[in-house]
Structure formats: structure tokens, C-alpha cells
Image: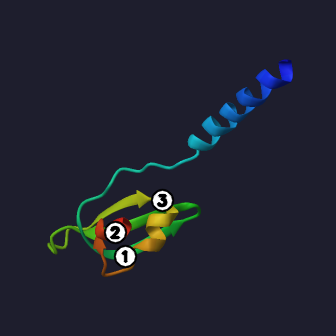
Amino acid sequence: MRRLILAPVLVAVAGLALAGCAQDFGKGPEGRVTDKTKDGKKFYLVVDPKKEGKEAKFRVSKYDYHDCYRGSKYPKCIDD
């Protein structure tokens, strides 16, 4: 009987642990990606919001980093 109770509890704990691993970084400003930088396991995009030369650098997930190329429109590049 204990084994029947223990199995669902272990599955629930494992599910919560994996859900806690997801990275959720805030979205940066809309604009063109002008540069991409990587610092160890931290990934950054540099975006020029309205082609004014006032670039904004912000942290993104590694998946967003790989999906956005220099010259692409942000956040469209992560939504496609």
C-alpha cells in the first residue's frame, strides 16, 4: 500500500523540480538585433529599438539567443 502512495508523490516532486528549471527572462524592447553576446552560460541580445542608436542589452534564454540573428526583428525572431 505504501508503494502505491509513494510512486505518485515521487512523480509530482520530479515534475515540480523540472518546472523550476525553466528560465523566464523579461522581454526586451522591440527593434533590430544589432549584436549577440555570450558570457559563459549567460546569453544576451543587443537591440536598437527605433534605429536611434540607443541600443539596449538584455539577457535571454539560450533558445532565444540561437533563434535571433543579427539584423532580425525582435521579438518576432523568438515568436516564429
Q: Amino acid at mark 2?
A: Val
Q: Amino acid at mark 1?
A: Asp
- Callout 3 secondary element: loop
**Foreground: 13 or 6?**
6
**Residue 30 image position (x, y, % from top left):** 23, 64
- Image point 32% across, 55% down: which residue? 27
Please identify, in this view, whether the residue under mark 2 or under mark 3 is nearer the observer.
Answer: 3
Residue 46: mark: 2
Q: Earlier in the sequence, mark 3 or mark 1?
A: 1
**Foreground: 20 or 34?**
20
Kindly identify which residue carries mark 3. 61
- Image point 35% across, 50% down: which residue? 26
Q: Earlier in the sequence, mark 2 or mark 1?
A: 1
Confirm or deny contact between disc 2 and disc 1 (CB under 8 A).
Answer: yes
Please identify, in this view, whether the residue under mark 3 or under mark 1 is nearer the observer.
Answer: 3
**Residue 54 image position (x, y, % from top left):** 20, 67
- Image point 37% across, 76% down: which residue? 35
Q: Based on the displayed image, in which of its 4 quarters is residue 37 positioned?
A: bottom left
Q: Amino acid at mark 3?
A: Ser
- 43 to the left or right of 32: right
